[in-house]
Image (cartoon, rainbow, N blue to C red):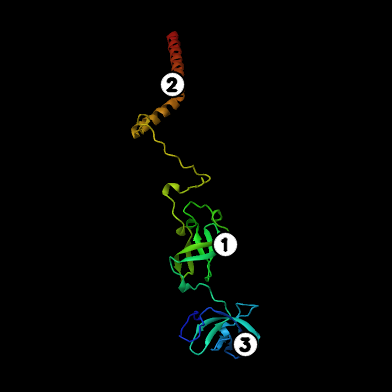
Amino acid sequence: MESPIEQTSTTQTSLKPKQKFEGKVMKTSLQGAIIDIGEKVPGFLHISQVVNVVAPDAVVKNLEDIIKVGDSVNVWVRRVLKDHVELTMREPLALEWREIAPDMVLHGKVVRLEAFGAFVELGAERPGLVHVSELSHNYVRVPSEVVKVGDEVDVKVLEVDKRKKQIKLSMKALQEAPEAEEIEVKRPARKGKAKQEVEVEVPAEEVIPDPTFMEIALRQAMDRAEKRKPQISNRVKRAKDVDTDQDDIFDRTLKGKQIKD
């Protein structure tokens, strides 16, 4: 694992980590190259810090495939030691993880928008995220209502997760909080859901108390009885017709018997 750029000695030179130089390759070896950067102390570029411009992520195995004696190269100071300066061809981050802390105020550029927030480039290994709820004190439906890609913004660091390499930011933390009654709320009604009802104060004399359980049950029974009235009437009528027919048959039967007797 490569060591971070840091100053580890009290050398007499004014060199500082992350300083950029255009140096000249003086000598090469299997381990690296000696680079003249115009300072009293020599600069050493280890082979692990050599970058192939064509394939920046490729591992360099043969130094002379990339640089040769007499070449001019852009290098940055990694560490300042007593007898030499360690160099790198990898441009250092403007902001190291160890340098980022909560409550820091940073300046960055919006590089990407998502439904959940805006990503802001700070010069760190990864952009930080301003969640949509941290863009403004007012309600924000989508980030594009507040910012667009390319905007330069000031942000405050809320949280740094070095393990997950996440930086949580806020823009509203740097804005003056409005009075409670001035906060603008524009929550659109969602499809398929009823809009929020506005509570209206009803005068006491117009308030109708909720029916009791017994009243509800009685009302339901009365409604069912009302609906069944036609059916009951038809049944009674049919029953009367049957009784009438039976009475006629019985009368005819008695009369016939009396005649025979």
Residue 52 image-quadrant placement? bottom right
In front: mark 2 or mark 1?
1
Q: Secondary structure at mark 1?
A: strand
The residue closer to the viewer here, 132 or 234, is: 132
Q: Are marks 2 and 1 in contact (CB under 8 Å)?
A: no
In what quadrant of the picture does the C terminus appear? Answer: top left
Q: Is residue 68 left or right of residue 204?
A: right
- Which residue is label 3 attached to? 25
Q: Are marks 3 and 2 in contact (CB under 8 Å)?
A: no
Whether residue 255 is visible here, answered yes or no, is yes
C-alpha separation, residue under disc 3 versus residue under disc 1: 40 Å
- Which residue is label 1 attached to? 112
The residue closer to the viewer here, 210 or 20, is: 20
Q: Is residue 158 left or right of residue 22?
A: left
Location of residue 231 in the rendering, given as x and y in whole percent from the top left corner: 46, 25
Residue type marked 2: Val
In front: mark 3 or mark 2?
3
The label on residue 247 is none
Location of residue 219 in the rendering, given as x and y in whole percent from the top left corner: 38, 29
Q: How many marks?
A: 3
Mark earlier in primary sequence (2, 1): 1
Residue 70 image-quadrant placement? bottom right
